[in-house]
């Protein structure tokens, strides 16, 4: 069974940094692209970033480009999201999601999410 | 960026009803479209990808159709467990984008 367990969410001040992790199990991690998708409280879904199975290709939403960095450790079966220069509008539940293949397309399944709150 | 819109934003329906949700892309996305279901307090779940391909384990009462810019999700006979919010997502070009969601409520 595929399992995705996010961690690292916290309350952080504007301008601060945070690193999210997503521990994956139940599938061959290197064979699949992975993404981060967020959901602000009471709002819809926003794709944030994706990475190919090899880790060699990364993609970002315009709203986080230059501030967030996605990476993966295929030996530890873990996905990361380094978040710098955080803003109030980054407050959201951050989901890690597995893709259907080695390139970023469709997301299934998703983890349960980790909450990031940016506030002073 | 490709903008996704959904209509209606909410719909009230009864068990057994046929429900149709429409998703429109601001430019052509070929067949790169998915539908997700999200229940309160839960992570989204992939229902349909590539416009009409049913994800494994998803009941056949769910179906998708469309092409280019206009797409439809149909629930042929609404069941109690189908009351949720539904999102479309384009995977034609980065950054990927979701529609604003359609909430299916009990009448």
Image: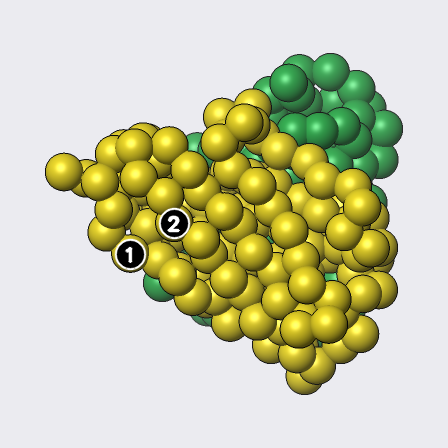
Chain colours: A yellow, B green
User: Is the residue marked by circle 1 packed among few (<14), some (14-19), or many (20+) residues within 10 Å?
Assistant: some
Q: Quadrant of the C terminus of chain A?
A: top left
**Crowdedness of circle 2 by 10 Å Cα count: few (<14), some, many (20+)?**
some
Q: Position of residue B47 (x, y in %)?
A: 67, 57
* Outermost residue to the left: A120
Disc 1: host chain: A
* A17 left or right, relative to B78: left
State whether residue B69 is above or below residue B57. Answer: above
| The quadrant where residue B106 appears | bottom left
Residue A55: percent from left, percent from top: 76, 51
Residue plotted at (42% across, 37% down): A84
Mark 1–mark 2 distance (CA, rounded to whole Å): 8 Å
Name the mark on residue A10: 1
- Mark number, residue B106: none
Residue marked by disc 2: A18
Which chain's residue wears label 2?
A: A
Q: Position of residue B13 (x, y in %)?
A: 44, 50
Tag 2 secondary structure: strand
For the point 51% across and 72% down, the residue is A5
x 80%, y 56%: residue: A53
Q: Name the residue located 33 percent from the left edge and 50 percent from the top edge.
A: A116
Q: Is residue B101 visible?
A: no
Asked if residue B34 lies left or right of residue B19, the reply is: right
Cβ atoms at labels 1 and 2 below 8 Å apart? yes
Judging depth in this view, the residue of A110 and A84 nearest the camera is A84
Please tell me whether mark 1 sits on a helix, a strand or a loop. loop
- Mark 2 or mark 1, which is nearer the start of the sequence? 1
Front: mark 1 or 2: 2
Image spot of residue B16 (x, y percent)? 54, 61
């Amino acid at each position: 069974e595929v399992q995705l367990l996010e961690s690292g969410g916290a309350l952080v001040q504007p301008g601060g940094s945070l690193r999210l992790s997503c521990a994956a199990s139940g599938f061959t991690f290197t064979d699949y692209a992975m993404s981060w998708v967020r959901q602000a409280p009471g709002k819809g879904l926003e794709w944030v970033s994706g990475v190919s199975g090899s880790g060699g290709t990364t993609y970002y939403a315009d709203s986080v480009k230059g501030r967030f960095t996605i990476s993966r450790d295929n030996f530890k079966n873990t996905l990361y999201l380094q978040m710098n220069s955080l803003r109030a509008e980054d407050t959201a539940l951050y989901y890690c999601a597995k893709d259907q293949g080695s390139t970023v397309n469709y997301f299934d399944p998703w983890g349960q999410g980790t909450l990031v709150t940016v506030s002073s | 960026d490709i903008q996704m819109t959904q209509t209606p934003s909410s719909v009230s329906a009864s068990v057994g009803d046929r429900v149709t949700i429409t998703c429109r892309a601001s430019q052509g996305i070929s067949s790169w479209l998915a539908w997700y279901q999200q229940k309160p307090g839960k992570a989204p779940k992939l229902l349909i990808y590539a416009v009409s391909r049913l994800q494994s384990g998803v009941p056949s009462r769910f179906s998708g159709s469309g092409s280019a810019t206009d797409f439809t999700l149909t629930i042929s006979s609404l069941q109690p467990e189908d009351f949720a919010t539904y999102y479309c997502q384009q995977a034609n070009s980065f950054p990927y984008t979701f529609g604003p969601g359609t909430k299916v409520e009990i009448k």
